[in-house]
Image (tube, rainbow, N blue to C red):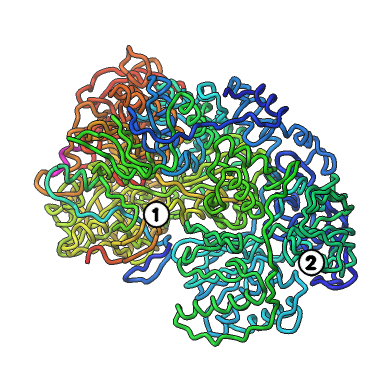
């Protein structure tokens, strides 16, 4: 698998680390919304949005849009942007 | 038809013409008491134990493809009871006991072989953790023996004791652990269930779960609607998709775990050996292939295949641990879809929808759990009470934080267990 | 027999080799198989299950029969295909899976018992008591199974891995592949041409055919010469592309000719923007009775041996097929001087020829243990027997679709060709061409190769200057498939695994009707050739048995590797210490010089203890070092702890977010102990945080968690709090850090500092800049031992020198260096934590650190830590234990019970996480996690370690065993 880092270009999978579904952190005390954020997953068989880090490159956290069935990569963007 | 040596003799002398189907292929009936979605090991075992333990035979197992086509047919065949957290410990202990009588229960040789499992350790800290595990196993009534370096050297002389990256300090020996012929487990349970009246329906994909007033009433399938009082989702690898048919979201992320087999070789590895520092485990099948695997590929996938970085890492682990396997040729690689949960432990529970039951989240421990899971889910379906061995596998433990079973201590990131 | 002329072998270069203990001679350019045939050897192996005698069936990597063991000792290589082993001087090959000898194999008795050993027989028997299965049946089965043997000897294996990148990867150097490479090469693309064989050309080397007015082999050689002249083309012979992975990544195994200093094999990761699959086709045997006998060979292989190797595989041949290729085989045989006793063509309208032709007939049975003749069933139903020692058969060709299916693509059935073809678009960027894509003539293959390359070039934005196509054979051989010949007898489908047509029919009868079930039940296609020869035939038999068509029956899944790969190649570099990086601190040479045993801590190595003369056990050294710290002064290398530099206007706000306690209130020049949680509310790591400037902090982590904490903080900074202006950098390797602990630590430190410390400005938990010999350093007054202590950090290049000095000066004071063992004793005496307690399952509540959970701010893990289940009273919580029974020993990993209960899971009250013998207190001490622990101080519990057979009564106590008030560190 190869991902195209917005900073570094196309690189091999082994430079990246998957970091979970790209969700938005809730606020406040524990609630069902927090349970959803920490535990429950859409877990799509198809297109998904995920956090990845280019740890062996620029260290940027990225949002990768990827197909979990075909492993096609649709988009890679900077997570913090 | 009862299987046995005499039967083989008779059939052999008469041209093997008398053998019949191992399980029936009936048309689906319009209604059942219980519908089990998923004809994998767990689903088929559930059907078998429903019939055998509870006398419930108006049961259908619906399978999208062919039975045993999921993880029960694509794993590294390891059977063990070496967990240490309450909840897991009693469950796998019970499951192993069911393994030990499976062949007589099923009249089917699943080649369960208690060749012993050895978990290696490489530091004092790992030793203490492994001792805790072994003590938990003995507390539970299972077996565990601490092997020091010299004892291990006698048992596994082929390990690289002297020049590996992580020196081998010893191992935890679980003599009752071992392997089994994975496909045969599915077929044996299918035969046992079918013989007792359960309908096993292949090529029947569930496309909808019907509910009325918050209660399950049946399922829609590619072979028509089927009514049911109770429906169990036992579809490891597709748990989320099937549960979503009932509007549920599960604490599961699906990941790919690769495994490998080499060409056949004369016997060289007698036990199952695991190498924690390298996430590597290996055994040798009765056919002679070295069967081994490693860690997840770490990204979500339903593709049942992985990529080279993990392949290579597994092979590198093998080379540092037991370089004598270097000349063995990898013949085939494959991938299974793992239901990864936030604590690495499974779920057998009622769903928030009345009449709907869940059996999922086996991470990569599903194979050894086949009989235990079937037994416990059958009990839950029949009595609406969890079986003692599986009382810890609650769906709500994540939300409440009560009774989490995080054997790896990795926390709520699904892929790290 | 070697023919008098022809072939692509070098008749001047004779190579001596041994097989089964006998010496033979072959020629340069031979495979082991061709050399064996040249020497008249027909029996080369035994089958897996029935131990049937076997000869050579094919001339390629799909060979199911002719498996041999090469070499001896560490070089011993089991299961090598004789058909792909390049002959070399001194090669030693031995038959395998035969005892006592290849000719007389005791287990051949299995063949007589075959009625009782049909598919899946083992599922139906041996169900007796477990002990009998494990002690009698299973060991017997295991011994009988398997093929070759690993030597179990290990030597310095020379394998390597490498990466390569190209515009176009051409897989296969037959007519299609060569033409594709020429087209792309001339257009200026970066091309890799990978071919499994040691001689490029594919079938062009095996057929007597003209291409471009010369021999096919000659054209191929010229094409290779042209390609070699192109700097943008790399020809990789002996290179099998083994797997297709995502985004144009291909695995490939390259074998190298034996030469000193060169690796045996290289496993390549090839990243290709486009690929052309020109993998050719594989001929399939016909399922007819006793088709597995030595002397039965695929017709295409017969032509390979005749034309490429100049070897006649027999003297008197029968040719059987249903295609014009049959006559071609017969003609090639006759030209080589082999008598063609019969040409059996299953087609009614066979080509007319001057051979003894049997049209509309089939070879029904092979006669003899090795081929002595065949029984031919004529169109009119009569049987005729013909003497022969060679049967050249062809059931047709299976396009080699394997690689096109690695990304889950399923091949598509082509009814007109009776073959599966690659599904269009099955692998993004991979274009199939030639006979793997259904082309049946050389001309079509050449054209397809050129066209595929042109398509790839267009995708790449390169302009093709399409080279001219050479003239070549373009007559369709009018092939008709033959799957199974009717009639009695056992007909092999999977030769190696001994799967016959009956086994497949039996499987169908037993309801193993799905192709996957049939495969798994019969083991069809699970041998070393993975069904390359027999797979599609098996489908046709299953289709017949279940009343379905072949496409309805479907195929099993094709999975990497295409050709098996030695683990040593895929795992190259992992052997020995190469498996993981080794990280050494700056003072590593000092530790070694002092004789310290080094232990792993993550990827780092740390000194365990420093033995001195007269000390017989590690405990003696450890006790001395611990007491030394308590009484005088000790020096410890703590460089492996993670150090993260945090800077920016929002650094304080950021740290408040990642720590559960507050860091924004920390004053400059001060250090605070901090706790980081995971978002699920459990502790991730602990450590100190020093504020070394208004907007500048230094975070320390445990050794093991440094990487995880850095990744976590980067996630928090970039994803969770992108609005904060903060920058992180790991400086673990940049600073060498040494702990100086003990009553004399300040005195020792003052010996090396450029100006002595002012006690008034350096209270406990102070930090600041100092200089050592003019070198700027950072000093932290922190303590992991409970003593008055400091940690001093200098740029890593000064670390060794400073550590050496500090040790020498400490020794002069009666102190010295201390290692991990003593460090562990000291921290347990103080009830301080490591990953034995921070095991990923514990919370601040569990470790009596609830006070470090700020209620005034949001932080990672705050919400989840508030879940009721994580605050339940019955959770195991941190306590100290000390032995009070007769046995005075504690062990980590033991369980705690009420004294009067049995040691069962139900009764377990807690576990022991850390233990040490405290030389200061004179007894064992331990940390434990005990249910309701803090409420149970003073109670007695029983510690049980089944594994180590230790059981003792313990008193539950406060985890701070020594100086609980902490005065020693502060004073």
Q: Tell me the element at label 2.
A: helix
Indicate whether C317 appears above or below C487. Answer: below
Name the N-terminal-most of marks 2 and 1.
2
Q: Can residue B399 be seen at all in this image of the molecule? A: yes
Q: Quadrant of residue C117?
A: top right
Residue A53 pos. (x, y %): 33, 60
Q: Label 2 to label 1, Cα distance in Å?
A: 85 Å
**Is C673 on the left-hand or right-hand side of C3?**
left
Tell me the subunit letter for badge 2: C
Stretch in magenta: C847-854
Which label sits on residue C803?
1
Residue C353 pos. (x, y %): 83, 68
Q: Quadrant of the N terminus of chain C?
A: bottom right
Residue drawn at point x = 40 percent, y = 59 percent: A71
Q: Can residue C924 be seen at all in this image of the molecule? A: no
The answer to whether marks 2 and 1 mark residues whose Cβ atoms lie closer than 8 Å is no
């Amino acid at each position: 698998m190869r991902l195209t880092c917005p900073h570094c270009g196309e690189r091999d999978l082994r430079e990246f680390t998957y970091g979970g579904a790209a969700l938005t952190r809730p606020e406040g005390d524990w609630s069902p919304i927090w349970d959803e954020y920490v535990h429950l997953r859409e877990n799509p068989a198809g297109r998904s949005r995920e956090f990845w880090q280019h740890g062996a490159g620029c260290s940027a956290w990225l949002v990768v849009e990827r197909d979990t069935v075909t492993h096609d990569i649709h988009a890679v963007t900077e997570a913090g942007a | 038809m009862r299987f046995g040596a005499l039967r083989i003799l008779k059939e052999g002398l008469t041209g093997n013409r008398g053998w019949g189907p191992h399980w029936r292929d009936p048309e689906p009936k319009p209604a059942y008491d219980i519908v089990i979605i998923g004809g994998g090991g767990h689903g088929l075992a559930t059907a078998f134990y429903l019939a055998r333990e509870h006398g419930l035979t108006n049961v259908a197992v619906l399978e999208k493809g062919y039975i045993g086509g999921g993880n029960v047919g694509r794993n590294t065949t390891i059977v063990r009871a070496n967990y240490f957290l309450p909840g897991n410990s009693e469950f796998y202990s019970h499951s192993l006991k069911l393994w030990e009588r499976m062949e007589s229960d099923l009249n089917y040789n699943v080649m369960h072989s208690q060749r012993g499992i050895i978990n290696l350790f490489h530091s004092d800290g790992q030793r203490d953790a492994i001792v805790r595990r072994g003590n938990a196993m003995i507390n539970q009534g299972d077996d565990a023996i601490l092997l020091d370096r010299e004892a291990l050297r006698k048992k596994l002389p082929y390990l690289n004791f002297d020049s590996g990256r992580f020196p081998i300090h010893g191992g935890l020996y679980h003599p009752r652990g071992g392997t089994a012929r994975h496909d045969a487990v599915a077929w044996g349970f299918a035969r046992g269930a079918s013989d007792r009246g359960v309908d096993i329906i292949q090529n029947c994909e569930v496309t909808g779960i019907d509910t009325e007033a918050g209660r399950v009433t049946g399922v829609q399938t590619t072979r028509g609607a089927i009514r049911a009082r109770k429906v169990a989702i036992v579809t490891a690898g597709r748990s989320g998709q099937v549960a979503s048919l009932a509007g549920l979201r599960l604490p599961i992320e699906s990941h790919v775990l690769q495994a490998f087999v080499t060409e056949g070789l004369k016997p060289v590895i007698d036990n199952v050996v695991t190498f924690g520092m390298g996430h590597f485990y290996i055994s040798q099948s009765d056919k002679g292939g070295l069967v081994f695997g490693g860690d997840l590929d770490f990204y979500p996938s339903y593709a049942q295949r992985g990529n080279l970085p993990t392949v290579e890492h597994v092979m590198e682990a093998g080379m540092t641990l037991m370089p004598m396997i270097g000349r063995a040729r990898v013949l085939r690689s494959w991938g299974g879809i793992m239901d990864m949960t936030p604590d690495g432990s499974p779920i057998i529970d009622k769903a928030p929808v009345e009449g709907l039951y869940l059996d999922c989240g086996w991470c990569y421990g599903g194979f050894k759990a086949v009989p235990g899971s079937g037994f416990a889910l059958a009990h839950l379906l029949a009595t609406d009470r969890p079986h003692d061995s599986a009382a810890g596998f609650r769906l709500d433990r994540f939300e409440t934080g009560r009774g989490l079973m995080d054997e790896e201590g990795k926390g709520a990131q699904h892929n790290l267990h | 027999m070697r023919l008098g002329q022809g072939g692509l072998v070098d008749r001047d270069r004779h190579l001596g080799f041994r097989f089964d203990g006998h010496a033979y001679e072959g020629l340069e350019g031979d495979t082991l198989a061709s050399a064996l045939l040249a020497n008249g050897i027909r029996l080369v192996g035994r089958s897996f299950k029935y131990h049937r005698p076997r000869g050579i069936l094919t001339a390629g990597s799909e060979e199911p029969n002719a498996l041999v063991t090469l070499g001896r000792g560490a070089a011993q290589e089991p299961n090598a295909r004789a058909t792909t082993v390049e002959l070399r001087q001194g090669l030693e090959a031995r038959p395998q899976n035969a005892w006592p000898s290849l000719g007389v194999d005791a287990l051949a008795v299995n063949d007589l018992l075959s009625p009782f050993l049909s598919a899946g027989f083992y599922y139906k028997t041996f169900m007796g008591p477990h002990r009998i299965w494990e002690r009698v049946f299973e060991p017997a089965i295991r011994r009988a199974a398997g093929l070759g043997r690993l030597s179990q000897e290990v030597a310095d294996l020379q394998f390597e891995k490498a990466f390569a990148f190209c515009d176009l990867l051409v897989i296969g150097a037959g007519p299609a592949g060569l033409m594709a490479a020429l087209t792309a090469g001339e257009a200026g693309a970066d091309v890799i041409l990978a071919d499994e064989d040691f001689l490029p050309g594919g079938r062009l080397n095996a057929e007597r055919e003209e291409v471009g007015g010369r021999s096919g082999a000659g054209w191929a050689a010229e094409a290779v010469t042209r390609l070699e002249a192109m700097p943008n083309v790399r020809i990789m012979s002996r290179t099998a592309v083994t797997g297709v992975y995502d985004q144009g990544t291909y695995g490939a195994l390259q074998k190298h000719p034996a030469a000193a200093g060169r690796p045996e094999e290289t496993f390549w990761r090839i990243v290709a923007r486009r690929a052309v699959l020109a993998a050719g086709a594989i001929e399939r045997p016909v399922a007819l009775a006793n088709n597995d006998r030595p002397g039965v060979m695929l017709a295409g292989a017969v032509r390979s041996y005749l034309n490429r190797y100049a070897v006649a595989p027999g003297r008197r041949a029968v040719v059987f097929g249903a295609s014009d290729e049959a006559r071609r085989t017969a003609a090639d045989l006759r030209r080589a001087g082999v008598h063609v006793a019969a040409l059996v063509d299953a087609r009614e309208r066979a080509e007319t020829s001057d051979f003894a032709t049997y049209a509309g007939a089939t070879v029904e049975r092979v006669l003899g243990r090795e081929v002595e003749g065949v029984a031919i069933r004529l169109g009119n139903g009569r049987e005729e027997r013909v003497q022969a020692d060679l049967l050249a058969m062809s059931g047709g060709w299976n396009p080699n679709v394997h690689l096109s299916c690695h990304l889950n693509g399923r091949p598509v059935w082509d009814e007109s060709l009776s073959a599966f073809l690659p599904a269009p678009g099955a692998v993004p960027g991979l274009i199939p061409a030639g006979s793997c894509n259904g082309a049946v003539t050389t001309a079509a293959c050449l054209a397809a190769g050129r066209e595929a390359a042109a398509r790839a070039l267009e995708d790449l934005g390169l302009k093709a200057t399409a080279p001219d196509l050479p003239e070549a054979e373009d007559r369709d051989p009018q092939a008709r498939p033959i799957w199974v010949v009717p009639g009695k007898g056992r007909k092999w489908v999977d030769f190696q695994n001994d799967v016959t047509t009956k086994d497949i029919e039996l499987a169908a009868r037993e309801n193993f009707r799905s192709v996957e079930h049939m495969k798994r039940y019969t083991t069809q296609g699970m041998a070393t050739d993975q069904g390359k020869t027999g797979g599609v035939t098996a489908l046709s038999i299953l289709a017949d048995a279940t009343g379905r068509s072949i496409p309805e029956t479907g195929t099993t899944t094709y999975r990497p590797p295409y050709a098996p790969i030695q683990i040593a190649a895929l795992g190259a570099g992992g052997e020995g210490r190469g498996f993981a990086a080794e990280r050494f601190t700056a003072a590593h040479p000092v530790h070694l010089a002092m004789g310290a045993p080094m232990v792993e801590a993550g990827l780092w190595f740390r000194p365990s203890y420093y033995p001195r003369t007269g000390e017989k056990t590690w405990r003696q050294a450890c006790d001395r070092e611990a007491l030394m710290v308590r009484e005088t002064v000790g020096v410890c290398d703590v460089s492996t702890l993670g150090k993260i530099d945090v800077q920016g206007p929002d650094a304080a706000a950021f740290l408040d977010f990642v720590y559960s306690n507050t860091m924004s209130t920390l004053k400059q020049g001060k250090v605070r102990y901090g706790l980081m949680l995971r978002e699920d509310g459990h502790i991730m790591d602990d450590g100190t945080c020093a504020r070394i400037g208004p907007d500048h902090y230094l975070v320390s982590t445990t050794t093991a968690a440094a990487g995880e904490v850095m990744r976590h903080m980067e996630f928090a900074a970039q994803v969770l709090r992108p609005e904060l202006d903060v920058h992180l950098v790991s400086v673990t390797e940049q600073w060498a850090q040494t702990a100086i602990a003990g009553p004399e630590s300040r005195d020792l430190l003052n010996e090396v500092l450029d100006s002595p410390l002012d006690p008034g400005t350096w209270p406990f938990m102070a930090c600041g800049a100092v200089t050592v010999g003019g070198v700027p350093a950072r000093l932290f007054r922190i303590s992991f031992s409970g003593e008055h202590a400091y940690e001093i950090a200098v740029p890593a290049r000064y670390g060794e020198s400073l550590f050496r000095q500090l040790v020498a000066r400490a020794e002069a004071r009666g102190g010295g260096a201390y290692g991990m063992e003593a460090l562990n004793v000291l921290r347990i005496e103080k009830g301080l934590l490591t990953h034995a307690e921070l095991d990923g399952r514990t919370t601040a509540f569990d470790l009596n650190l609830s006070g470090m959970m700020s209620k005034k701010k949001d932080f990672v893990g705050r919400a989840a830590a508030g879940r009721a289940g994580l605050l339940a009273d019955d959770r195991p919580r941190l306590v100290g234990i000390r032995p009070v029974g007769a046995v005075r020993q504690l062990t980590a990993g033991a369980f705690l019970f009420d004294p009067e209960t049995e040691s069962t899971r139900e009764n377990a009250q807690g576990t022991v996480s850390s233990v040490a013998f405290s030389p200061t207190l004179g007894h064992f001490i331990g940390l434990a996690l005990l249910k309701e622990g803090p409420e149970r101080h003073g109670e007695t519990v029983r510690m049980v370690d089944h594994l180590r057979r230790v059981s003792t009564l313990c008193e539950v106590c406060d985890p701070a065993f020594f100086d609980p008030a902490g005065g020693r560190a502060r004073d």
